[in-house]
Amino acid sequence: MVDVSLNKLISISEARTRMSTLVANLNKEDYFVITKTGDPTAALISIPLLEELLIKMPLKESKGDLFLNSAGMWKDVDVKRMIKRIYRAREDRSSSKKFLVNTK
């Protein structure tokens, strides 16, 4: 949980009532933590502070990004040769199993 000073906590009902004043009084490095039934639920922060936080905190990569980033690892692989080997191995397995099949 985030350590927040008490003067930064504001209830959701108070935030609703004072939203215009809160936004107008936000300083560059200012924020308020909005609580619902006493639990921190949301934050109201200045744009400069948000930008600073986003720059410092890298976003998680999605699975798609991880896949695309790993694509460069395949640059030295001869894909056509690999595919031929896969098909050849499949043919070898299927032909070696033919004698096991009961042909009546």
Image: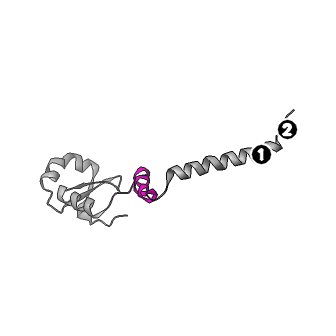
User: Residue 47 versus residue 59: which sits nearer the camera?
Assistant: 59
Side (left or right) of 57 relative to 83: left
Q: What is the magenta range?
A: 59-75
Q: Name the residue under label 2.
A: 102
Q: Is mark 1 on a helix, strand or loop?
A: loop
Q: Position of residue 36 (x, y in %)?
A: 34, 51
Q: Mark 1 points at which residue?
A: 97
The mark found on residue 85 in the picture is none
User: Residue 31 versus residue 104: which sits nearer the camera?
Assistant: 104
Side (left or right) of 51 relative to 42: left
Image quarter hosting the C terminus:
top right
Residue at 25 percent of width and 61 percent of height: 55
Q: How many residues crowd mark 2 within 10 Å: few (<14), some (14–19), many (20+)?
A: few
Q: How far apart are marks 2 and 1 (CA)?
A: 11 Å
Residue type beneath disc 1: Lys
User: Residue 54 versus residue 95: which sits nearer the camera?
Assistant: 95
Q: Position of residue 14 (x, y in %)?
A: 23, 50
Residue type beneath disc 2: Asn
Side (left or right) of 79 relative to 9: right
Q: Where is residue 10 in the image (x, y as percent from the top left)?
A: 26, 56
| Magenta segment includes 61 | yes
Residue at 55 percent of width and 52 percent of height: 82
Q: What element carries label 2?
A: loop
Q: How many residues crowd mark 1 within 10 Å: few (<14), some (14–19), many (20+)?
A: few
Image quarter hosting the N terminus:
bottom left
